[in-house]
Image (cartoon, rainbow, N blue to C red):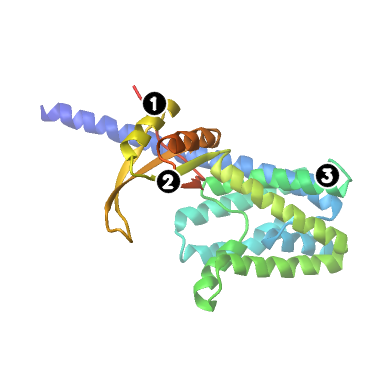
């Protein structure tokens, strides 16, 4: 009996090892693809139209513009101090991912060097921002990064009393101000627009095209409302115990996650049972797991 248990355990260990290898391999494949997409956006949309990115990549682009040094090498070497800075606080695995991502970006920037898609600044701003956001989003989704600004901001936030977002914003304001003197203020403003487009697309890549919403319902008729939602919307609900702050009465709260297209129908169901029901609806950025349906 012990022999078979040991054999089964060994098989499970092998399967677990294979899964870990597959996860690491897939992570680096996606980081490579993300770096390639980001480099394509930089070289084919932004650089030919004097539009820069924020952070270390933006600084590298301006230094390359002034000195004519290789952009790929500048991105790699300017990021190096920040990568070593991350080693002290963020772990070896993250540092390896960042180092690999920055290296791949540097390589692909040189591969795509000299190519351009459009000479229209507005088109380059919009499509460059979208493509760059997709590339950076893929890398962030796989525990990597391309820019040392965030690493610096995380390290400085606790010591100087500003938030990470405020530090990044201050750095980028400085970068775009310098860009205005180098490229002209039209290019600087296009660069700022690209920055906002990029970060909106990054959010979409990280969170998905998820239009789900969570609903919290407080009513005198929780069972009736819960049954109506299960029956008519074909989703499950969760009942939670609560206590009224003013009345001190025990209450049953209803919680569920629904598609945005189901919101209007759910409201109609609730009002049909209890016109005085208290309803809170919030955006849900990410939903994982099985959606339980009625049998």
Q: Which residue is labeled 3 in the image?
A: 123
User: Dot 3: what SS?
Assistant: helix
The earlier-in-sequence mark between 3 and 1 is 3
In the displayed image of the protein, which residue is found farthest to the top? Answer: 295
Residue located at (85% from left, 66% from top) = 182
**Residue 90 horizontal side relative to residue 67, left or right:** left
Look at the image and tell me in which quarter the N terminus lies. top left
Front-most of residues 33 and 261: 261
Of 72 and 51, the residue lying toward us: 51
Rendered location of residue 271, percent (x, y) = 46, 38
Residue 82 x, y percent position in the rendering = 58, 65
- Label of residue 285 in the image: none
Q: Nearer the viewer, residue 82 or 229?
A: 229
Q: Nearer the viewer, mark 3 or mark 2?
A: 2
The residue to which callout 1 is attached is 231
Give the crowd class for mark 2: few <14, some 14-19, many >=20 residues within 10 Å.
few
Quadrant in the picture for residue 295:
top left
**Disc 3 versus disc 1: nearer the observer:** 1
Tell me whether circle 3 and circle 2 mark residues in contact (CB < 8 Å).
no
Assign a secondary structure to mark 2. Answer: loop
Q: Mark 2 sits on what residue?
A: 276
- The local crowd at label 1, few if under 14, some if 14 to 19, many if 20 or more residues have their Cα within 10 Å, is some
Q: Earlier in the sequence, mark 1 or mark 2?
A: 1
The residue shown at (51%, 41%) is 27
Q: Residue at x 65, y 52 (%)?
A: 199
Alpha carbon separation for disc pair 3 and 1: 48 Å
Question: Who comes first in sequence, dot 3 or dot 2?
Answer: 3
Residue 137 in percent (x, y) is at 60, 46
């Amino acid at each position: 009996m012990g022999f078979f248990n040991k054999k089964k355990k060994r098989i499970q260990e092998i399967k677990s090892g294979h899964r870990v290898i597959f996860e690491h391999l897939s992570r680096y494949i996606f980081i490579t693809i993300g770096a390639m997409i980001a480099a394509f956006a930089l070289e084919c949309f932004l650089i030919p139209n004097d539009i820069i990115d924020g952070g270390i990549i933006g600084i590298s682009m301006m230094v390359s513009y002034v000195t004519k040094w290789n952009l790929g090498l500048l991105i790699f070497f300017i990021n190096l101090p920040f990568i070593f800075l991350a080693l002290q606080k963020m772990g070896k695995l993250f540092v390896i991912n960042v180092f690999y991502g920055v290296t791949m970006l540097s390589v692909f920037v040189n591969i795509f060097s000299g190519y351009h898609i459009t000479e229209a600044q507005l088109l380059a701003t919009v499509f460059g921002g979208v493509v760059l956001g997709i590339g950076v989003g893929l890398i962030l989704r796989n525990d990597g990064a391309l820019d040392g600004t965030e690493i610096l901001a995380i390290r400085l936030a606790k010591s100087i009393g500003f938030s990470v977002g405020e530090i990044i914003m201050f750095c980028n304001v400085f970068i775009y101000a310098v860009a205005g003197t180098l490229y002209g203020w039209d290019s600087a403003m296009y660069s700022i627009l690209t920055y906002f487009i990029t970060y909106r697309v990054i959010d979409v890549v990280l969170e998905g095209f998820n239009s789900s919403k969570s609903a919290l319902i407080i009513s005198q008729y929780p069972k009736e409302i819960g049954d109506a939602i299960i029956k008519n919307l074909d989703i499950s609900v969760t009942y939670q115990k609560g206590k009224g702050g003013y009345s001190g009465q025990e209450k049953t709260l209803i919680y569920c996650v629904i598609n945005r297209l189901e919101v209007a129908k759910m409201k109609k169901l609730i009002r049909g049972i209890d016109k005085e029901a208290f309803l809170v609806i919030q955006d849900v950025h990410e939903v994982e797991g099985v959606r339980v349906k009625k049998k």
